[in-house]
């Protein structure tokens, strides 16, 4: 894959990211893998820092993405000296911090690990960045679950109260506070600008995490057994993984080019009409992958019944907005996993889906 093949010069991203040194923490994960491909296509010099492969089956390994990164560091993001050594070697201009323990149910089983990784990991990343020169932007990726959930029918805005009733949500709200603390204490005068990004439930090919709806459906379809739903009535802001990643790239560009006005918190969620129940999403994808559904009594661990984001700020100030409908997102997701099941070329399928996405962005005039 050659840099610049995505044809996005009209959006300004190719010109901006060409030869930029970009470091991704959590680059071997679901979002991180897609981000590696996107940035490589934009001509960036990509490096990554991860504890290892997050799942037994991984997109990073299946697509052999090691050939897309200049430096492939393996280490613990909570260990300051390990990460500092990596950033000193890379000398990144942009850091995207995605490394995390991302599963709500896992956070109930390992609350200390979740809090340590998500809170102290964020603190270590920001502390290392303040210790070196040359970093112009750092984006800390959190979640829509960082808000104090009131089961509202409307989406949360960036100035809403933070909260977290489960260890995962709490850890991400704390990560937001850590980012704000470091911004005000160390980065307020630049030259590095800090922002946080809160996205909805992302779907797409390449996710094999435990206790996530789409990977659970894929595993069930492959094994020929029904998928078991825990909370079929829960409402979530579903979006294809490329939607928020595109927002992250736009935001990092503005942090570098414009600076402080773009620091702080940003939502990247789907339109309200794209929010849907777990049961509806499962039904659509199961029909694509020929899988049956069964439900069982909800587990005792609390999960929010309704979540939504208001992304007006990103639309008005970044020119970002969702470009894929829910049906398109599900169709792309199913096609990616079918390609995997059929033994197809997943690198080509990933490039093909990226090309389709960029085409939709240009057609929608999203920038």
Image (tube, rainbow, N blue to C red):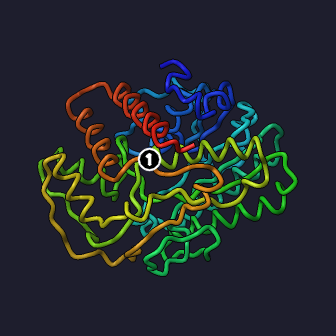
Is 112 placed above or below 151 here?
Answer: above
Crowd rating for badge 1 (residues with CA inside 10 Å; few <14, some 14–19, many 20+): many
Kindly give the residue lying farthest to the bottom in the view shown: 150
**Residue at 53% across / 66% down in the picture?**
310
Kindly give the residue lying farthest to the right in the view shown: 189
Is 223 placed above or below 112 here?
Answer: above
- Give the left or right position of residue 123, taking residue 75 as reference: right
**Residue at 22% across / 76% down in the picture?**
297
Residue 181, percent from left and from top: 76, 64
- Mark 1 lies on residue: 323
Q: Nearer the viewer, residue 54 or 136?
A: 136
Residue 306, percent from left and from top: 40, 73
- Give the left or right position of residue 256, taking residue 337 as reference: right
Q: Nearer the viewer, residue 70 or 36?
A: 36
- Locate the C terminus and report the quarter of the image it occupies: top right
Tell me the element at label 1.
loop
- Does the image show residue 229? yes
- Does the image show residue 113? no
Residue 201, percent from left and from top: 42, 58
The quadrant in which residue 55 appears is: top left
Residue 147, percent from left and from top: 55, 72
**Residue at 59% across / 27% down in the picture?**
9
Figure label count: 1
Q: Nearer the viewer, residue 65 or 267?
A: 267
- Give the left or right position of residue 67, taking residue 218 as reference: right
**Residue at 35% across / 69% down in the picture?**
235
Is 150 placed above or below 1 here?
Answer: below
């Amino acid at each position: 894959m050659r840099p610049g093949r995505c044809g996005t010069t009209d959006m300004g991203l190719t010109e901006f990211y060409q030869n930029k040194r970009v470091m991704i923490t959590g680059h071997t994960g679901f979002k991180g893998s897609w981000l590696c491909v996107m940035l490589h296509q934009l001509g960036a010099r990509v490096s990554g820092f991860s504890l290892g492969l997050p799942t037994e089956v991984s997109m990073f390994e299946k697509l052999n993405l090691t050939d897309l990164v200049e430096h492939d560091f393996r280490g613990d993001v909570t260990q300051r000296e390990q990460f500092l050594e990596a950033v000193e070697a890379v000398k990144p201009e942009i850091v995207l911090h995605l490394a995390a323990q991302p599963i709500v149910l896992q956070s109930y089983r390992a609350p200390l690990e979740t809090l340590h990784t998500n809170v102290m990991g964020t603190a270590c990343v920001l502390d290392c960045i303040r210790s070196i020169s040359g970093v112009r932007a750092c984006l800390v990726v959190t979640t829509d679950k960082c808000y104090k959930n009131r089961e509202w029918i409307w989406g949360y805005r960036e100035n809403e109260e933070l909260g977290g009733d489960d260890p995962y949500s709490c850890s991400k709200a704390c990560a937001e506070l850590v980012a704000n603390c470091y911004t005000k204490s160390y980065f307020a005068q630049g030259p590095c600008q800090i922002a946080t990004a809160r996205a909805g439930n992302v779907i797409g090919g390449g996710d094999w995490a435990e206790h996530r709806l789409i990977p659970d459906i894929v595993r069930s379809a492959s094994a020929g057994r029904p998928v078991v739903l825990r909370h079929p009535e829960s409402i979530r802001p579903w979006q294809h993984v490329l939607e928020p990643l595109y927002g992250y790239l736009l935001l990092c560009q503005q942090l570098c080019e414009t600076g402080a006005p773009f620091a702080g918190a940003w939502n990247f969620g789907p339109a309200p009409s794209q929010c849907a129940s777990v049961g509806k999403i499962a039904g659509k994808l199961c029909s694509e992958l020929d899988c049956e559904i069964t439900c069982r009594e909800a587990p005792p661990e609390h999960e929010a019944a309704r979540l939504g984001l208001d992304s007006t700020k990103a639309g008005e100030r970044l020119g970002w907005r969702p470009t894929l409908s829910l049906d398109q997102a599900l169709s792309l997701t199913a096609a990616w996993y079918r390609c995997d099941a059929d033994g197809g070329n997943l690198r080509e399928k990933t490039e093909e889906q990226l090309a389709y996405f960029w085409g939709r962005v240009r057609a929608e005039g999203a920038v």
